[in-house]
Amino acid sequence: MESLGKLGLDPLHLVAQVVNFLIIAWIIYRFLLKRMLATMNERREKIAQGLADAEKAKAALQDAAKERDKILQDASAEAFRLLQNARDEAERLRAGALERAGRDAERMIEEARGVMALERQDMERAVQGLSLRLSGRILEKVVQGLFTEDERARIVARGLERIGTASTPRGDSLPS
């Protein structure tokens, strides 16, 4: 202990200081350090949990991105398929409309030809009737001074009859 005295230390004070240090260290450990270590461990666990959750979120985000890309690809393929179907249907409808229009045009042309044929027949009959009347008048004028009234009527009637049968080979009846 003397050696402590040579160093300028009082052994009683030294022991009291060591005891005070140990008491304060024990109080700090018991009330402060233990709580600080528990709080630090809690924070460490929360940080580890947060990192794990971030990794899970990152993996979920990547999965969602893959799923989004797959959905977009499927939607694009479906849209292309629908567009192609619509084009095919439009082409089919166009072809059907063209076919119907062609048939309608042919039917209209045939109807017009029929109407034209009937009108032509009517015109031929009208021209034939007109020519018979003109022929009758011409015959009357030609035979007017040459024959009597009865003879003239018979000659004109017979001439008109011959002209009428000669100009209607199908046996159509003539208007008078």
Image (cartoon, grey):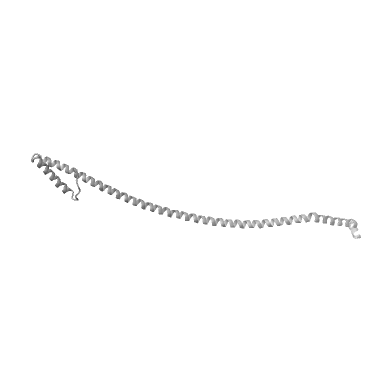
Which residue shows up at 23% across the image and 45% down it?
Answer: 122
Q: Where is residue 141? Give x, y as percent.
A: 12, 40
Q: Quadrant of residue 62?
A: bottom right
Nearer to the camera, 70 or 26: 70
Quarter that holds the C terminus: top left
Nearer to the camera, 154 or 44: 154
Q: In this view, does 31 lie to the left or right of 135?
A: right
Q: In this view, does 107 lie to the left or right of 79?
A: left
Q: In this view, does 142 lie to the left or right of 105?
A: left
Tell how many labels: 0
Farthest residue in the right direction? 2
Farthest residue in the top direction? 145
Which residue shows up at 82% across the image and 56% down it?
Answer: 26
Q: Where is residue 137? Give x, y as percent.
A: 14, 41
Nearer to the camera, 20 or 119: 119
Which residue shows up at 12% across the image and 41% down it?
Answer: 140
Quarter that holds the N terminus: bottom right
Q: Where is residue 123? Give x, y as percent.
A: 23, 45
Farthest residue in the front direction? 150
Nearer to the camera, 11 or 93: 93
Q: Where is residue 106? Give x, y as percent.
A: 32, 51
Which residue shows up at 81% across the image and 56% down it?
Answer: 30
Q: Quadrant of residue 56?
A: bottom right
Q: In which quarter of the image is residue 52?
A: bottom right
